[in-house]
Image (cartoon, grey):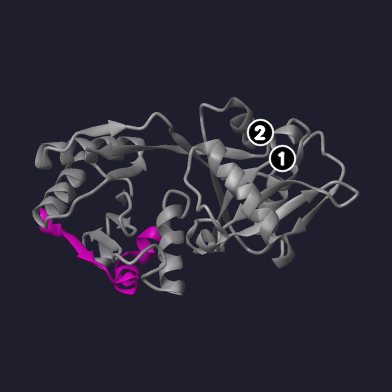
């Protein structure tokens, strides 16, 4: 395999013409690539920052074997790669002078690329402690017990509430969040569709977001319940409702990510009918 078997572009439409079919062939494994490219296609190349995004695919359009995307100044995010494919990609990117802050991918792919990048650039890869596990909804299982209340789609009047809860969610999981409301449009939450679970008196007690449907798939993200309201079944109820709504709207694949080190959330999602697909890890390069 030659490094120039990897074809690179900063044009999302050109990338999707060539690699879109490959990405749609496994919407669960390729959920991040599908949602990122859809956002760039719909909102423009500056969606994630002023720096141009980067895309690449391996092979000809009739037989694409792998692909990757990188948002502005972001981590490299390849699909599943063999060690040989990862090495060829590292040589290609290093030879063109690209500087990468890290790689985020299925765990074996991330390890293979991190090692290849170390060999070809001298960078030191550091494995982040937190992993995430990808789950796909199989046969939905209603939450048991089912809490009293109902689901409600969040609207414009709920904006301040959503911002407050998304800020709290990112604090819980160690992500950054803009200090003021002006930065909301640049977050990964701005384009999501949110659903609240409300108690019978109309008080929101939990929320779940979901991506727009792309290639027949929807990703549930995030799921959040304030700490003092946890353990009452609210997260399960709102997650089940978002999955049900996605299926009713025509989605054939519903996925979500969860921390495998959190036994509460992983047990909850499996009780709702979510099956594990793959584990993902991140390496930072220094």
Q: Residue at x 32, y 64 (%)?
A: 19
Q: Seen in the image, is 278 located left or right of residue 151?
A: left
Q: Seen in the image, is 275 located left or right of residue 28?
A: right
> Where's residue 111, x and y in %?
27, 35
Is 252 one of the magenta-colored residues?
Answer: no
| Residue assigned mark 1 | 236
**Cα separation between marks 1 and 2:** 7 Å
Please say whether residue 138 is visible from this viewpoint.
Answer: no
Q: Nearer the viewer, residue 101 or 243?
A: 101
Quadrant of residue 103 within the rendered picture: top left
Category of crowding for the residue at label 1, using alpha-carbon neighbours closer than 10 angstroms: few (below 14), some (14–19), many (at least 20): many
Q: Residue at x 74, y 65 (%)?
A: 157
> Where's residue 274, x and y in %?
60, 40
Q: Main secondary structure of the magenta part?
A: helix
Q: Seen in the image, is 92 located left or right of residue 237?
A: left
Q: In this picture, which residue range is highlighted in magenta?
A: 3-23
Q: Secondary structure at mark 1?
A: helix
Q: How many circles with numbers are drawn on the protein?
A: 2
Which residue occupies the extreme front position in the image?
A: 180
Vertical comparison of 131 with 9: above or below? above
Q: Name which of mark 1 and mark 2 comes first in the sequence.
A: 1
Q: Residue at x 69, y 48 (%)?
A: 207
Category of crowding for the residue at label 2, using alpha-carbon neighbours closer than 10 angstroms: few (below 14), some (14–19), many (at least 20): some
Please say whether residue 147 is visible from this viewpoint.
Answer: yes
Q: Residue at x 54, y 60 (%)?
A: 184
Quadrant of residue 190 within the rendered picture: bottom right
Instruction: Find out whether the residues at labels 1 and 2 contact each other: C-beta distance under 8 Å.
Output: yes
Q: Which mark is residue 268?
A: 2
Q: Nearer the viewer, residue 194 or 172?
A: 172
Vertical comparison of 269 with 219: above or below? above
Vertical comparison of 43 with 51: above or below? below
């Amino acid at each position: 395999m030659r490094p120039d078997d990897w074809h690179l572009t900063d044009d999302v439409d050109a990338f999707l013409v060539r690699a879109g079919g490959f990405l749609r062939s496994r919407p669960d494994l390729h959920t991040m690539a599908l949602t990122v490219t859809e956002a760039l296609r719909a909102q423009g190349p500056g969606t994630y920052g002023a720096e141009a995004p980067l895309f690449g695919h391996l092979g000809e359009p009739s037989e694409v074997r792998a692909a990757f995307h990188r948002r502005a100044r972001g981590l490299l995010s390849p699909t599943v790669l063999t060690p040989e494919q990862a090495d060829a990609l590292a040589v290609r990117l290093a030879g063109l002078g690209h500087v990468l802050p890290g790689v985020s991918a299925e765990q074996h792919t991330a390890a293979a690329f991190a090692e290849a990048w170390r060999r070809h650039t001298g960078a030191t890869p550091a494995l982040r402690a937190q992993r995430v596990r990808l789950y796909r909804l199989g046969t939905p299982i209603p939450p048991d017990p089912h809490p009293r209340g109902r689901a409600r789609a969040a609207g414009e009047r709920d904006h301040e509430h959503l911002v407050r809860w998304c800020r709290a969610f990112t604090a819980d999981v160690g992500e950054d969040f803009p200090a003021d409301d002006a930065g909301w449009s640049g977050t990964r939450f701005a384009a999501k569709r949110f659903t609240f679970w409300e108690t019978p008196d109309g008080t929101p007690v939990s929320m779940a977001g979901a991506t727009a449907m792309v290639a027949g798939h929807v990703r549930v993200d995030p799921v959040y319940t304030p700490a003092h309201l946890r353990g009452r079944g609210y997260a399960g109820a709102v997650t089940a409702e978002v999955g049900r709504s996605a299926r009713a709207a025509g989605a054939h694949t519903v996925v979500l990510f969860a921390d495998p080190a959190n036994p509460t959330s992983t047990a909850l999602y499996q009780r709702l009918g979510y099956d594990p697909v793959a584990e993902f890890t991140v390496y930072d390069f220094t």
